[in-house]
Amino acid sequence: MNVLGFDTSTRATAVCVLRSDGEAYERVPAVVDLHEPPAHARELMPAIADLLAQVGLDWPQLDRIGVSRGPGSFTGLRIAAATARGLARAHGTPVRGVSALSALARGLDAPLALPLMDGGRGEVFGALYAGGTEVWEPFSATPAELLSRIEGLEGSPASAGGGSLRLRRMLEACGVRVSHEDSAVHVVRALHVCRLAADGPADPAGALFPLYLREPDARPAR
């Protein structure tokens, strides 16, 4: 299966084309991109076109589009969902939405994986996976709420993501292993989005909606 996958749930833009022979052509963001101003609208489509050219595939040869539906940045998630729906309708390519947290967890080689994204407002978005199986469904939590969850765990998870970098001191004091701050495990890789998207049925393009865990910051003026 030839799969195009992308993620714009954080400030970074990740894109990958995974060929049916297993060869992957990928744009892996740098960890520093998690702290830079987002540029999804400017970067996403050119990155997709560039990777398709590198891999030598055209749109009719793609079997699926995989997209990270969140949680994450409201603007980034809207851009990802709108792009995936538009491409699916324009080219007749099946699409599948996947969890950004599940993709982040795929980069952790540990029995217990605790991906944590910086959710803003002093909170983190997280989930817990054991052997790739979801144990805690995606949640939004303050540091105190996260600490309460971790204290009830049996075993020491490994953690990655912008949220784990922000809360490193607290997490390590609880026995959670946080990867080095320069490690690529802290970014959502589109390669993992591709693999997750290939594993399961496609979604109706019109039913592809972002995964929001809370209300948006911006509210209509009255």
Image (cartoon, helix red, strand yellow):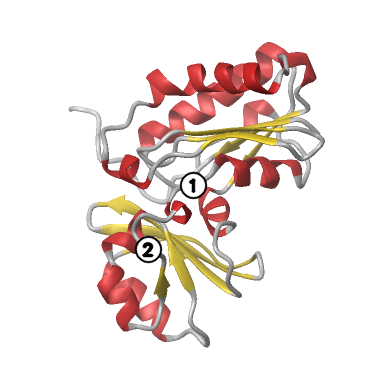
Around disc 1, counting alpha carbons within 10 Å, would you say few (fewer than 14), some (14 to 19), or many (20 or more)?
many
- The image quarter containing residue 85 is top right
Task: Give me the residue at 48% from left, 84% from top.
Answer: 153
Name which of mark 1 and mark 2 comes first in the sequence: 2
Locate the N terminus by quadrant: top right
> Residue 122: x percent and y percent?
23, 58
> Residue 216: x percent and y percent?
31, 40
Q: Secondary structure at mark 2?
A: loop
Around disc 2, counting alpha carbons within 10 Å, would you say few (fewer than 14), some (14 to 19), or many (20 or more)?
few
Task: Give me the residue at 45% from left, 51% from top.
Answer: 184
Q: Amino acid at mark 2?
A: His
On the picture, is 195 further left or further right than 99? right
Q: Nearer the viewer, residue 216 or 48?
A: 48
Q: Nearer the viewer, residue 50 or 106?
A: 50
Locate the C terminus by quadrant: top left
Point out which mark residue 101 bears. Answer: none
Q: Amino acid at mark 1?
A: Val
> Residue 91: x percent and y percent?
71, 14
Residue with the mark numbered 1 = 188
On the picture, is 199 further left or further right than 35? right
- 46, above or below 19, in the image: above
- The image quarter containing residue 208 is top right
- 42, above or below 184, in the image: above
Q: Nearer the viewer, residue 147 or 155?
A: 155
For the residues bearing labels 1 and 2, Cβ distance under 8 angstroms = no
Task: Give me the residue at 79% from left, 19% from top.
Answer: 61
Residue with the mark numbered 2 = 180
- 41, above or below 31, in the image: above
Q: Secondary structure at mark 1?
A: loop
Residue at the far top in the pictured view: 90
